């Protein structure tokens, strides 16, 4: 191989490598751009036209129902929106508060009734869960 | 309406590993063991009622939610032998306060000839997320395996040596007190094995008092009753002294006529009646009678201890009687007079000793009262034992009465006049079961009899069967912590491997069952 042929090959390789680098940088920039757009979209809620509710006839009190919660066990994905990032973790067992325990009908077993739990979410923010007293009179009464 | 957890609706007798529910369906449950082995701290039919105060009654809505054959209970539960809802406790539940309960367990109890040692282990019960806490406290009782005297004292004389077992006898509703019993039983071989009454009977009771909470929990064991209390004798009979009727004495003169010899007056030939009034001399002979008088007896057998609140109450069957031997109404009847030649010089020649016969009547009567004591309701039975002796021509005829039954036996001798009649505890029959027995008759002949056959089943249930000299035994009912409970069962004179128990919730009893019976 002549010196000119060798120089031409090296130049070609350099060009190809340079092109790959530029391509990857462009792709990264595109991803950052899309993520930023997505994040901004999440922060800046577009104004939406509020739907008009049709008029409902009065139905009386709201029937009582058992409270429930749904847990998000996905890894932390805080978006800085003020929401709770799972998982929620209880760090201090003794911080729990209880209602009077619920007795079994034979009077022998006292089942603890949790009143309050202090948790921390994935971002270290404190989350307080306050539960209803199951021994309290049922709701819906006038 | 406050929400609460409804627990354990399955109640009824437990036998052969099954609960029989109110709709006659069955449900499996671990059968308490029938064993006198160490480590088995309850009898096969023992159960203990737990009562928790201030628990609202079951509402109609809750009752309606019970499963078929089931029933919710409010504020109470039964420890079935050694288990609660199928979980082995080997002890009881102590309620230290309205919100705290503790499981008191017996562990590693060992009896030697001289003492009984073991441990109580206390842990929190019925509450979740409580700090782990366990208290172990040993105890030593200065009484060990039963001696022959102790075993025979509780109607268990057929033993091969010293033996005993410690059982949880009864528990107060709060569990703040419990009674431990040391039990003896007959363990000699017999053929078949069931021919001997092997039911354990307590010969010592100890009271366990539990106080405090958490680290301040303390158990104190104090002696409650020993054999002299268990077989208490308040009054022993004193009759038994006898006297004989002296030979008939010469009484009043019947006639007198002069007697001449060779024309010379030598004296009078005098005839005498026998003195009608017999004279008695204290003695013992075949013709002796019991000395008239009154005596009595009062003895009891404590077969169990129940609780009235926190107070232990002995459960006794008592037999007391008052016995009267009346002054006999006898007199001598002259058959042929005494004839004597009474010489003027003072000499007396008995020409005819004459004959006299005793006539009259004598009565002995015993009024017996049998009482079941200590139960919430008192139970008693009264019986009259009576013998009316008639002596005619010195031949004795006795009319015997036992309540409304009577029988007359003649051809007896003076020794059978006014037999001493009594009723008391015996070890009955070949099976050696405890009993109260009255035999009305003379010497060794029983003419009328009455027996109360006493089966110390479990859980304060004393089965009572009645038998007479002609009628075999039949259960009448049982003495229980609540008093007399009418009941029937499969009584056997020869097969004493029978079981029974008392349900502290329903008051039901099971008597003479062929397999162990308990309750939940």
Image (cartoon, helix red, strand yellow):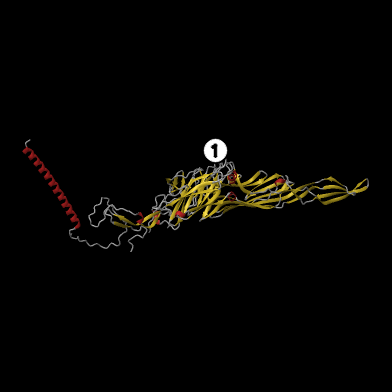
Between B372 and B55, the one lying in front of the other is B55
Q: Is residue A109 left or right of residue B207?
A: left
As helix, strand or loop, the secondary structure at mark 1 comes to loop
Q: Is residue B320 visible?
A: yes
Q: Is residue A12 left or right of residue B14?
A: left
Q: Quadrant of residue B213?
A: bottom left
Q: Which residue is mark 1?
A: B192
Kindly give the residue lying farthest to the bottom in the view shown.
A142
Between B478 and B73, the one lying in front of the other is B73
Vertical placement of residue A114 versus B36, above or below = below
Kindly give the residue lying farthest to the top in the view shown.
A1
Q: Position of residue B10 (x, y in %)?
A: 42, 49
Between B498 and B100, the one lying in front of the other is B100
Kindly give the residue lying farthest to the right in the view shown.
B263
Between A39 and B187, the one lying in front of the other is A39
Q: Is residue B512 visible?
A: no
Q: Is residue A27 left or right of residue B43?
A: left
Q: What's the chain of the residue with tag 1?
A: B
Residue at the spot 84% in from the left edge and 47% down from the top edge: B339
Query: Label 1 crowding class (10 Å Cα cut-off): few <14, some 14-19, many 20+?
Result: few
Say which quadrant the N terminus of chain B sits in: bottom left
Number of labels in the image equals: 1
Q: Position of residue B480 (x, y in %)?
A: 53, 51
Q: Position of residue B348 (x, y in %)?
A: 86, 47
Q: Is residue B177 left or right of residue B245?
A: left
């Amino acid at each position: 191989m002549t010196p000119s042929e060798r120089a031409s090959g090296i130049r070609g390789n350099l060009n190809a490598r340079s092109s790959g680098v530029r391509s990857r940088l462009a792709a990264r920039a595109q991803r950052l751009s899309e993520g930023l757009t997505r994040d901004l979209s999440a922060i800046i809620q577009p104004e939406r036209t509020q739907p008009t509710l049709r008029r409902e006839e009065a139905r009386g009190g709201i029937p009582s129902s058992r409270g429930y919660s749904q847990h998000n066990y996905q890894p932390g994905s805080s978006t800085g929106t003020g929401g709770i990032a799972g998982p929620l973790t209880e760090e201090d067992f003794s911080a729990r508060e209880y209602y009077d325990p619920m007795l079994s009908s034979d009077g022998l077993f006292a089942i603890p009734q949790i009143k309050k739990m202090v948790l921390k979410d994935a971002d270290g923010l404190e989350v307080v869960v306050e539960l209803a007293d199951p021994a309290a009179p049922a709701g819906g009464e006038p | 309406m406050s929400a609460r957890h409804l627990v354990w609706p399955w109640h009824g007798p437990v036998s052969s590993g099954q609960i029989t529910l109110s709709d006659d369906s069955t449900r499996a449950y671990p059968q308490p063991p029938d064993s006198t082995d160490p480590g088995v701290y309850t009898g096969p039919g023992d159960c203990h009622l737990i009562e928790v105060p201030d628990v609202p009654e079951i509402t109609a809505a809750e009752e309606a939610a019970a499963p078929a054959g089931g029933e919710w209970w409010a504020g109470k539960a039964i420890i079935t032998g050694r288990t609660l809802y199928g979980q082995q406790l080997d002890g009881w539940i102590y309620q230290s306060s309205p919100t705290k309960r503790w499981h008191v367990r017996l562990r590693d109890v060992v009896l030697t000839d001289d003492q009984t040692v073991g441990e109580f282990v206390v842990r929190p019960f019925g509450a979740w997320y409580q700090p782990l806490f366990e208290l172990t406290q040993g105890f030593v009782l200065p009484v060990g395996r039963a001696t022959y005297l102790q075993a025979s004292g509780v109607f268990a004389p057929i033993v091969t040596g010293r033996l005993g077992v410690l059982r949880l006898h009864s528990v107060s509703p709060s569990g703040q007190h419990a009674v431990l019993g040391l039990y003896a039983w007959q363990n000699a071989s017999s053929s078949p094995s069931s021919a001997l009454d092997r039911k354990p009977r307590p010969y010592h009771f100890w009271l366990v008092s539990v106080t405090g909470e958490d680290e301040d929990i303390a158990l104190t064991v104090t002696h409650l009753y020993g054999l002299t209390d268990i077989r208490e004798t308040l009054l022993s009979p004193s009759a038994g002294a006898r006297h004989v009727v002296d030979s008939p004495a010469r009484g009043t003169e019947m006639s007198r006529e002069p007697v001449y010899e060779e024309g010379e007056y030598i004296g009078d030939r005098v005839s005498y009646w026998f003195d009608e009034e017999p004279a008695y001399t204290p003695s013992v002979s075949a013709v002796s009678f019991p000395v008239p008088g009154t005596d009595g007896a009062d003895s009891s057998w404590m077969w169990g201890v129940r609780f009235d609140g926190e107070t232990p109450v002995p459960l006794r069957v008592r037999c007391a009687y008052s016995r009267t031997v009346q002054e006999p109404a006898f007199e001598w009847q002259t058959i042929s007079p005494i004839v004597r030649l009474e010489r003027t010089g003072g000499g007396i020649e008995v020409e005819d000793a004459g004959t006299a016969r005793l006539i009259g009547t004598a009565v002995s009567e015993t009024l017996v009262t049998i009482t079941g004591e200590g139960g919430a309701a008192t139970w008693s039975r009264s019986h009259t034992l009576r013998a009316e002796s008639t002596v005619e021509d010195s031949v004795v005829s006795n009319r015997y009465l036992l309540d409304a039954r009577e029988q007359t036996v003649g051809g007896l001798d003076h020794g059978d006049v006014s037999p001493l009649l009594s009723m008391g505890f015996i070890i009955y029959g070949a099976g050696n079961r405890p009993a109260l027995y009255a035999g009305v008759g003379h010497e060794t002949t029983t003419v009328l009899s009455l027996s109360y056959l006493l089966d110390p089943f479990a859980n304060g249930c004393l089965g009572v069967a009645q038998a007479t000299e002609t009628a075999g035994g039949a259960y009448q009912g049982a003495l229980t912590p609540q008093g007399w409970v009418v009941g029937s069962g499969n009584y056997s004179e020869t097969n004493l491997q029978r079981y029974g128990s008392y349900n502290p919730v329903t008051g039901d009893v099971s008597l003479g069952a062929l397999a162990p019976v308990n309750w939940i």
